[in-house]
Amino acid sequence: MRRFSLWLRGKPTVADSILAVVLLTLEVLVFAASDGASPWVQLIMGLLLCLPIVWRRTYPCTAAGVILVMSITITFVSYSIDDLDAEHPGLFALAVALYTLVAYVGRRAAGLFVVGLVADLALAIWLLGQGVAATGVFSLLIFALSWITAEFLGARRAYDEEVAARLAVADYDRDRRAEDAVAAERTRIARELHDVIAHAVSVMIVQADGATYAVTTKPDVAKQALANIGIVGREALAELRRTVSLLRTEPATDDMPQHGTAGLARVVGMMRSAGLPVELELTGELDDISPAVSLGVYRLVQESLTNVLRHAGERPRAKVRVRRRDTDVLVEITDNGNASGLFSFGSGNGLLGMRERVAVLHGTLEAGRQTDGSWRVTAELPLELRD
């Protein structure tokens, strides 16, 4: 039964048709028991009175107007034809129409309909000689009950609609936050992959080119370059495994990159082995800052030195300054500004990745060419992350 009720709630025309059939059945029963004049006239008027209920929610004002007109017509026809029964069970449609106007249209339309009901009631009392107490009081109670019920159920319906709207907004907000979280995670993983691969491949290409030139004239140099390629490749593979473990939701343990002063010294040493002279200046305690900030410093230095190696010319030089201050960490990387490296064009993802990383840490980043032709990257990363 509950399932049928829920099904009817989604099909208002079907439910209203059932109500119209019920009232029409009562009209037929009255017709069958009637012995007055012209019973077929009474049945037809009852049918016309009940039929508009089918469309009471689709066209509420029109349906209410037709029902009211039919009620007034019944009064005049009953007055004109002697012995015609003026009692119609279908007159309950007036109360149904009033309920519909209050619940679905508004109090103003319902008020106008009440004026018509009062006129119809007064006309029936005057022409048909119905008792004021019997007819008027009973009709007043029925119409008052219809109005009160419509007000109560209308308020309940409005509350349900508001709750449904809030749930829809909450579902949308939840889905949007989930999509944002997925997008942020994908961006973070893409940024990590770019930092690892771009750095490793750039160093390996430089070392491979150097080994190619030195393999016949300086075999020891070529041997060292090949060894550096192996070291860089193994370290890149370890970091790739750690990043892939994030996709598999596996906890990373022994493949974590080394941060702090040791990590910075290692990446600088690797760049020096690749042929990039780097001057490193570390100020303040950098080993006890948060892992997120430490990783940010490490990646900024790594990506910046990789860009210097790729774009800063045949004899590139770089200077790295990392200074811990009271509330933040200052990272500054400067090259000598030849701007004619082995790689003429870049995708721009490196600088974009640095900006995204600094934004996640609520820091600031400035990158650009200076008046003396050098390229400088400056970042300020707060020590305490804000929510």
Image (tube, helix red, strand yellow):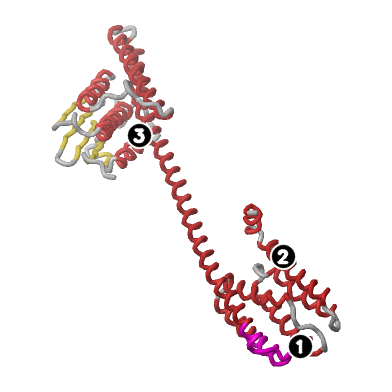
- Residue at screen point 29% across, 31% down: 299
Residue 268 in the image: above or below residue 228:
below
The answer to whether the residue labelled 1 contacts the one labelled 3, judged by CB atoms less than 8 Å apart, is no
Q: Position of residue 274 (x, y in %)?
A: 28, 19
State the mark number for residue 76. 1
Q: Earlier in the sequence, mark 2 or mark 3?
A: 2
Separation of marks 2 and 1 at Cα, in angstroms: 27 Å
Q: Is residue 167 above or below residue 178?
A: below
Mark 1 or mark 3: whose residue is earlier in sequence: 1
Q: Which residue is mark 3?
A: 350
User: Three-letter amino acid code at disc 3?
Assistant: Gly
User: Residue 33 in the image: x percent, y percent?
Assistant: 82, 75
Which residue is the site of mark 2? Answer: 17
Is 72 left or right of 362, judged from the image as shown?
right
Q: Residue 261 versus residue 344: which sits nearer the camera?
A: 261
Is residue 191 visible in the rendered image? The answer is yes
Question: Which amino acid type corresponds to the residue marked 1 in the rendered image?
Answer: Phe
Which of the pair 262/369 is nearer the observer? 262
User: In which quarter of the view is residue 205 placed?
Assistant: top left
Which span of residues is magenta-colored?
A: 118-137
What's the distance in space between the residues labelled 2 and 3, CA to CA? 68 Å
Locate residue 290: give its quadrant: top left
Q: Are marks 2 and 1 in contact (CB under 8 Å)?
A: no
**Percent x, y of residue 248:** 43, 27
Amino acid on which the number 2 mark rests in the picture? Ser
